[in-house]
Image (cartoon, rainbow, N blue to C red):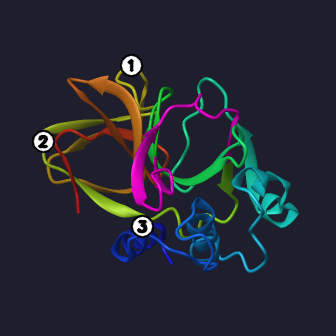
């Protein structure tokens, strides 16, 4: 199952209860994600969300990233909260900055599936798990330039060097692997990341 299909599926279902115990818990959403998107066949569970980090099978299939000041989670990263008695787990949507990030959660609000904007300090320490298998997470799409000229940058910032083809013109198209949060230009901080690893500010561009 592709990542975007996963999001649409759990939304249509209104959440998931994979084990039949205690209703729709955060672990149910996480286990559903591991099985259907990450294609993990072994046991991905634990008694509490915070103890996912002690699951050897899971940790062999992800890269552990302990939160640091400049870190921004990517689409598909698993956020694990270590604070509190049980912790919490959610799936990152790839939107955010160094102050907050967006994720799809279950049971952050009791028994509900919700989209949340989290800070990095509540119930810290916060650990992110980046799946080694990204085949169902990275979904390429085409972007069309609808303005006169679009600069191609080495980083999502107007101060960074021109890269690749350097400039795109109205009607040009390129393949993108997704969006990132970069420099805020005239109220818009969304940039497209090209498949070649360069960045184009999203204003005046259309996702096809």
Is 123 part of what is drawn in magenta? yes
The kind of secondary structure element at disc 1 is loop
Do the residues under discs 3 and 2 have CB atoms within 8 angstroms?
no
Query: Which comes sooner in the sequence, label 1 or label 3?
Result: 3
Q: Position of residue 22 (x, y in %)?
A: 60, 70
Question: How far apart are labels 3 and 2 at the CA level?
Answer: 31 Å
Stretch of the chain drawn in magenta: 103-128
Residue at position x 66%, y 52% in the image: 130
Of labels 2 and 1, earlier in sequence is: 2
In the image, residue 122 lies in the stretch drawn in magenta: yes
Q: Nearer the viewer, residue 40 or 189?
A: 40
- For disc 1, the marked residue is 159
Dot 3 falls on a residue whose secondary structure is: helix
Q: Quadrant of the C terminus?
A: bottom left
> Which residue is more in the foreground, 133 or 86?
86
Question: Dot 2: within a 10 Å radius of its alpha carbon, few (fewer than 14), some, or many (20 or more) residues?
Answer: some
Residue 173, labelled with which disc?
Answer: none
Distance from disc 1 to disc 3, alpha carbons, whole Å, reads 35 Å
Q: Are marks 2 and 1 in contact (CB under 8 Å)?
A: no
152, above or below 99, in the image: below
Q: Is residue 161 visible?
A: yes
Kindly indicate the quadrant of the structure image that contains residue 149. Answer: top left
Q: Residue at x 65, y 77 (%)?
A: 39
Q: Nearer the viewer, residue 87 or 148?
A: 87
Q: Is residue 4 left or right of residue 25?
A: left
Image coordinates of residue 197 in percent, x first then y, are 49, 46
Badge 1: how crowded within 10 Å, few (<14), some, or many (20+)?
few
Q: Nearer the viewer, mark 3 or mark 2?
A: 3
Identify the residue under disc 2: 147
């Amino acid at each position: 199952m592709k990542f975007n299909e996963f999001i649409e599926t759990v939304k249509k279902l209104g959440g998931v209860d994979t084990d039949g115990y205690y209703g729709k818990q955060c672990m149910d959403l996480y286990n559903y994600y591991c099985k259907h998107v990450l294609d993990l066949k072994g046991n991905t569970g634990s008694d509490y969300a915070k103890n996912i980090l002690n699951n050897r099978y899971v940790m062999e299939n992800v890269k552990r990233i302990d939160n640091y000041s400049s870190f921004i989670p990517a689409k598909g990263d698993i956020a694990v909260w270590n604070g509190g008695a049980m912790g919490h787990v959610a799936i990152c949507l790839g939107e955010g900055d160094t102050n907050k990030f967006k994720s799809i959660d279950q049971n952050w609000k009791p028994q509900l599936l919700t989209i949340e904007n989290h800070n990095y300090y509540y119930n810290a320490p916060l650990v992110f798990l980046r799946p080694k298998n990204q085949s169902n997470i990275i979904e390429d799409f085409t972007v069309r330039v609808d303005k006169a000229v679009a600069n191609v940058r080495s980083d999502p910032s107007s101060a960074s060097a021109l890269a690749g083809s350097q400039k795109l013109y109205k009607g040009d198209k390129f393949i993108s692997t997704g969006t990132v949060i970069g420099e805020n230009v005239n109220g818009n901080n969304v940039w497209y990341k090209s498949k070649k690893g360069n960045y184009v500010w999203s204003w005046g561009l259309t996702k096809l």
